[in-house]
């Protein structure tokens, strides 16, 4: 609870000096003096309102010289100094104001606050206690004294003041909440429950307190008490979806989960529960470790909620998350797209959309949605990566380079930078710009020396260009050491060995690759190395197989027809 602070209300007029009866008050002797004093005070108040504290202080000091026994002027000087963060200097003036007018409660409130501002908490508390002796029902002092004891950790004194507040002002929700917070921290659940009951007794027509008590009892597994409280609540309230929800949660906690979910569905069929409440309730149930069957029912309820509230982006994204987690990626995308159409400035949803589309090889959609997301998040490197990758797969190498180069500028994650440079290497290779391709690959390997995609493509393209074959062999060797059963990487290494003229070694890797993956390119490579080793008949059989599988080179028919190797 936050104890309320009340501003000081100065009820004493600064100009009513002629009405004072104290002998030590100096009263202006002439009308001219009175008018002059009034003018000085008015100007001081004006400067105080404008927060020109130095000017205000100067004028109040002039006023004090004209009437040194005015409690109000002393207090105004204290107030100005306090506002100027000069609490120590303010103290004598605050004390003098009380000395001159000991019955003014507002001066004591102000002095107590000055004490608090400079850390004199004991003096502040003493001042509040003195004030309460004179004005025991002064609400401001009661609340501020309670806050002071709260601040200094004086629990018993704080509770004593709480009791005073309740005795004089009745049960107050803010006081009850603070007590409950302390009792919860101390593990005194019975005391928390007792405080709830006090609120209910004090405000019998406030149904929310009864509902809150029931929820508290359920959450803290006081299930017998919760059941009894639900019965009492139901007897005083007409049947409602709120009661149905309470029964649902109680049944769940009692292990009656099927019953619980039936009640939950019944409650959600009504319109009396607002969307936000339904959304929070579903989130809570899904957080209580439902089994797969229960989760399926909760997901169905969530889908109904989203379909009924198609204008709520949170509901759409929530269902998207549930379906994505359940492996229903295509359905998830539909809800995610609904969500970003309603609220496009949601980066995590865009990211999920793009991840799914990349996984499903939906590259046309990937490019469209990545560039749509960039309208809202133009500095997100990952979005450029997705867009560039989509263009790369579509063989639009110029656009791929443009997006990937832009994304590189925004990338701070070394892993992502490795991937982007790797894709740039592929894109530049597609443009036949070998030098830029190799430079990009080299930069990728600087950040991620064991990146398999880069090691594979870099070594393979070098072998195709018959360039820097020693480097190609070093990279492909490292690749198959890390991935000894990957047919693509085995094929690359075998082909690098082939290009280096190491046909016997090449055969070992290409043969293994061909046994693991019936891909036309891999099978054709295996036939090529067989031909180089003089196994012509076996080579032709492999070429024929490669032709039938597809994805072989344009020379495959000529190789078969002429029984000759063309490269």
Image (cartoon, rainbow, N blue to C red):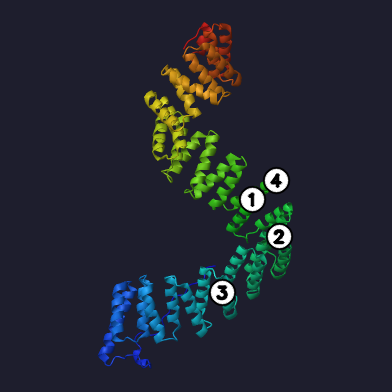
Mark seen at residue 247:
2
| Frontmost residue, 181 versus 368 | 181
**Distance between the Cα atoms at labels 2 and 1?**
17 Å
Whichever of labels 3 and 4 marks the residue nearer the N terminus, that label is 3
**Distance between the Cα atoms at labels 4 and 1?**
12 Å
Residue bearing the label numbered 1: 286
Q: Secondary structure at mark 2?
A: helix
Whichever of labels 4 and 1 marks the residue nearer the N terminus, that label is 1
Position above or below: 153 against 258: below
| Frontmost residue, 93 versus 220 | 93
Whichever of labels 3 and 2 marks the residue nearer the N terminus, that label is 3
Q: Is disc 2 in contact with disc 4, using a CB cutoff of under 8 Å?
A: no
Mark seen at residue 157:
3
| Frontmost residue, 415 versus 152 | 152
Residue plotted at (59% across, 20% down): 518
Q: Nearer the viewer, mark 3 or mark 4?
A: 3
- Image location of residue 264, percent across then percent down: 68, 55
Residue bearing the label numbered 4: 293
């Amino acid at each position: 609870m936050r104890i309320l602070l009340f501003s000081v209300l100065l009820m004493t007029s600064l100009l009513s000096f002629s009405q004072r009866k104290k002998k030590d008050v100096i009263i202006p002797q002439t009308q001219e003096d009175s008018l002059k004093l009034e003018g000085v005070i008015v100007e001081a108040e004006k400067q105080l309102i404008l927060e020109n504290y130095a000017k205000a202080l100067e004028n109040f000091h002039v006023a004090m010289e004209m009437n040194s026994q005015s409690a109000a002027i002393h207090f105004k000087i204290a107030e100005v100094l306090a506002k100027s963060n000069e609490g120590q200097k303010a103290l004598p003036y605050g004390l003098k104001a009380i000395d001159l007018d000991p019955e003014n409660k507002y001066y004591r409130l102000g002095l107590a606050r000055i004490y608090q501002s400079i850390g004199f908490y004991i003096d502040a508390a003493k001042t509040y206690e003195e004030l309460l002796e004179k004005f025991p029902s002064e609400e401001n002092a009661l609340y501020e004294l309670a806050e002071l004891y709260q601040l200094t950790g004086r629990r018993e004194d704080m509770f004593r003041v709480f009791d005073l507040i309740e005795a004089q002002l009745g049960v107050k929700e803010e006081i009850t909440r603070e007590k409950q917070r302390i009792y919860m921290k101390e593990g005194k659940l019975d005391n928390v429950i007792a405080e709830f009951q006090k609120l209910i007794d004090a405000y019998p027509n406030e149904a929310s307190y009864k509902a809150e008590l029931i929820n508290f009892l359920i959450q803290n597994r006081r299930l017998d008490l919760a059941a009894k409280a639900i019965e009492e609540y139901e007897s005083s309230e007409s049947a409602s979806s709120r009661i149905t929800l309470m029964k649902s949660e109680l049944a769940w906690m009692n292990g009656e989960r099927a019953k619980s979910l039936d009640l939950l569905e019944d409650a959600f069929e009504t319109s009396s529960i607002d969307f936000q409440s339904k959304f929070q309730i579903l989130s809570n149930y899904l957080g209580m470790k439902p089994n797969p069957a229960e989760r399926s029912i909760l997901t169905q309820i969530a889908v109904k909620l989203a379909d009924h509230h198609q204008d709520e982006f949170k509901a759409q994204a929530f269902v998207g998350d549930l379906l994505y987690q359940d492996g229903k990626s295509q359905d998830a995308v539909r809800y995610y797209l609904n969500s970003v159409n309603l609220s496009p400035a949601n980066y995590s949803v865009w990211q999920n959309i793009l991840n799914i589309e990349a996984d499903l090889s939906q590259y046309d959609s990937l490019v469209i949605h990545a560039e749509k997301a960039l309208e809202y998040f133009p500095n997100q490197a990952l979005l450029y990566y997705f867009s560039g990758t989509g263009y790369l797969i579509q063989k639009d190498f110029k656009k791929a380079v443009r997006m990937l180069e832009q994304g590189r500028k925004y990338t701070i994650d070394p892993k992502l930078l490795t991937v982007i440079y790797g894709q740039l290497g592929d894109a530049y290779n597609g443009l036949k710009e070998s030098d830029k391709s190799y430079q990009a690959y080299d930069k990728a390997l600087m950040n991620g020396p064991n990146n398999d995609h880069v090691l594979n493509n870099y070594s393979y393209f070098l072998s195709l260009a018959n360039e820097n074959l020693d480097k190609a062999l070093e990279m492909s060797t490292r690749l198959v050491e890390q991935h000894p059963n990957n047919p693509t990487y085995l094929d690359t290494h075998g082909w690098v060995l082939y290009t280096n003229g190491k046909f016997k070694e090449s055969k070992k890797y290409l043969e293994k690759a061909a046994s693991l993956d019936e891909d036309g390119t891999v099978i054709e490579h295996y036939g090529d190395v067989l031909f180089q080793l003089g196994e012509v008949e076996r080579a032709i059989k492999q070429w024929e197989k490669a032709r039938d599988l597809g994805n072989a080179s344009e020379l495959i028919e000529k190789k078969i027809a002429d029984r000759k190797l063309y490269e």
